[in-house]
Image: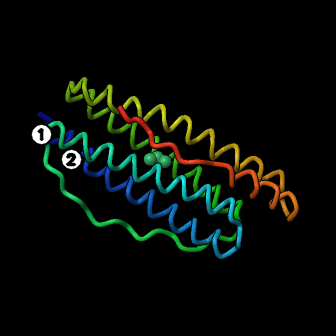
């Protein structure tokens, strides 16, 4: 059984993960309008990962005999000034998500919920990977500056990213 407080923290985080999916879907549309197919692909993988993150928590709450309640999803930003601007926003968002996972771990520790701690450790490790991955693309975009050929080369590289369904927990 899951405590009320722990359940509430998970329900709020499911909402944040679904918002993340929404945000990256919005960014995918932005890149589609720029005809940058590799960036579109990168965002599409991101969208699928966020959906998996939300569903992982959704399934976990049910598994612990909790009760799911879905909240309203915030409207995401719909426009950015440049690909660099987008990736700055992605990194800031992932850093925010990391702080949220840490906050969930604080609740799990205060509730002495060891199963939740083990479960959430997967998300924390995932955040380390996410931040490094996003930071890598951001660093390349900073180097690229206004060089359109270099941007197209990066677009080709990002087209290679493939979605692998995560094994959560
Ligand atoms: Fe679900 Fe990108 O963290």
What percent of the width, then of the height, locates residue 94? 52, 48
Q: Nearer the viewer, mark 2 or mark 1?
A: 1
Q: Residues within 10 Å of mark 2 (few under 14, many from 20)?
A: some
Q: Which mark is residue 86?
A: none
Question: Under tag 2, what secondary structure?
Answer: helix
Residue closest to the far bottom = 33
Q: Which mark is residue 65?
A: 1
Q: Are marks 2 and 1 in contact (CB under 8 Å)?
A: no
Quarter holding residue 70: bottom left
| Figure colour scheme | rainbow
Query: Who's the residue at 81% across and 61% down the image?
Result: 152
Q: Which mark is residue 8?
A: 2
The mark that comes first in sequence, 2 or 1, is 2
In the picture provided, is 136 more to the left or to the right than 129?
right
What percent of the width, then of the height, locates residue 10? 27, 45
Residue 82 lies, with reference to residue 17, above or below; the image says below
Q: Residues within 10 Å of mark 1 (few under 14, many from 20)?
A: few
Query: Who's the residue at 63% across and 48% down the image?
Result: 161
């Amino acid at each position: 059984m899951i405590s009320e407080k722990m359940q509430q923290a998970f329900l709020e985080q499911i909402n944040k993960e679904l918002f993340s999916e929404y945000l990256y879907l919005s960014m995918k549309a932005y890149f589609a309008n720029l005809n940058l197919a590799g960036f579109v692909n990168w965002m599409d993988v991101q969208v699928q990962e966020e959906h998996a993150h939300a569903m992982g928590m959704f399934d976990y709450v049910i598994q612990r005999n909790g009760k799911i309640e879905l909240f309203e999803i915030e409207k995401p930003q719909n426009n950015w000034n440049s690909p660099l601007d987008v990736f700055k926003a992605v990194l800031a968002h992932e850093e925010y998500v990391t702080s949220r996972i840490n906050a969930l771990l604080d609740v799990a520790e205060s509730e002495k919920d060891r199963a939740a701690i083990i479960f959430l450790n997967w998300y924390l490790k995932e955040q380390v990977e996410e931040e490094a991955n996003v930071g890598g693309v951001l660093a390349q975009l900073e180097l690229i500056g206004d060089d359109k050929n270099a941007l197209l080369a990066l677009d080709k590289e990002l087209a290679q990213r493939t979605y692998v369904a995560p094994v959560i927990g």
